[in-house]
Image (tube, helix red, strand yellow):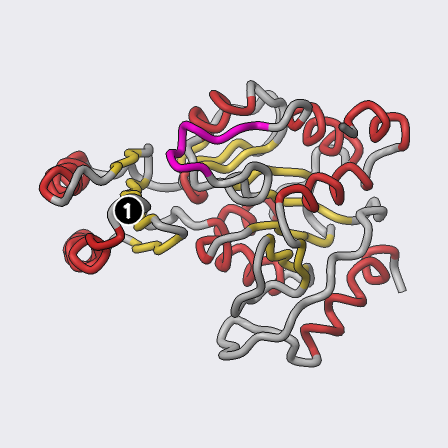
Amino acid sequence: MTDAQAMLSPTKAALDQGASGPDAATPGDLPPPAPLTSEDCAVFLDFDGTLVEIAERPDAVEVAPGLAELVTALSTRLEGRLAIVTGRSIAALQDLLGPVEIALAGSHGGEFRPGAGCAVEPLAEPIPAEIISTLERFAAANGGLLVEPKPYSVAVHYRHHPEALEALLTCAQGLASAHSLALKHGKQVIELAMPGSDKGTAVARFMSLPAFAGRTPLFLGDDVTDEDAFRAVRGLGGIGVLVGAMRPTAAAARLPDVTAVHAWLKAGLNPEFQGKTQS
């Protein structure tokens, strides 16, 4: 058994026993992931709800001190086999986290940076301006919903107007059908994305690169929009790690919250760095 197989064996066993799955009606709980000690893995991290707590507004999240240094150091330890894969644009992510020199995928995979120092590559066409303007008109007419345009998708947050959800879904479904868009329903948010914008596609593209190829992928994420990535890593012999409360999922392991994610990542580093980053 390889180091990677040993690392994955508890969670893969749980999946094989039917502890959970993407279509489970009443999911049982999942075990935590084994410690991140193998040199044979590749790590993919969602941002909101995984590395930072979800906030009332996307621009109001609080980034823990030392988080950028933590992911950068872990990327170095894994020889570049770490990427943040987020629904945010890469520009918006770096506004919050800083100009981290690691691999990144933004806009649900619509934009792709294969590694530190590399240019950002588009994997999708830009979202048409008329889609954004239609949603902005809808938002203004329904209490002032927050519309978040991105390069390859557009999100509408209804956290403060849950009564608008039914009408928002109808509007978004009509736009998705008319323009061949993917509709994603996350935590208090509806998002329309261009074809090619999904986290599973981004993970598969990373895993095709020489730096990642042949490694065992792990994806940590909290939302239903991360299920594409959970299924992708499962198909590549890896595991998804659900962050937060248990729900039906394709993940095979679970961590309870953002704090637990930080602790798990820190434990994958050498003791000297852990001592510097612990609060």
Is 227 placed above or below 145 here?
A: below
| Quadrant where the N terminus is found in the figure | bottom right
Read off the magenta span: 55-63
The answer to whether residue 73 is magenta is: no
In the rendered image, which residue does mark 1 sit on?
158
Q: Position of residue 131 (x, y in %)?
A: 17, 41
Q: Position of residue 274 (x, y in %)?
A: 83, 30
Reply above or below: 150 against 108. Answer: above
Determine the residue positioned at 78% across, 29% down. Answer: 278
Residue that appears at 28% across and 46% down? 158
Where is residue 46 shown, x and y percent of the image? Answer: 55, 43
Reply yes or no: does residue 59 show up in magenta. yes
Q: Secondary structure at mark 1?
A: loop
Residue 181 in the image, given as x and y percentages of width and height: 26, 52
Q: Is residue 26 above or below residue 72?
A: below
x 68%, y 23%: residue: 66
At a point 39% along the width and 53% down the height, the residue shown is 186
The amino acid type, in three-letter code, at marker 1 is Tyr
Q: Quadrant of residue 69?
A: top right
Is 194 on the left-hand or right-hand side of 264? left
Q: Is residue 221 above or below residue 173?
A: above
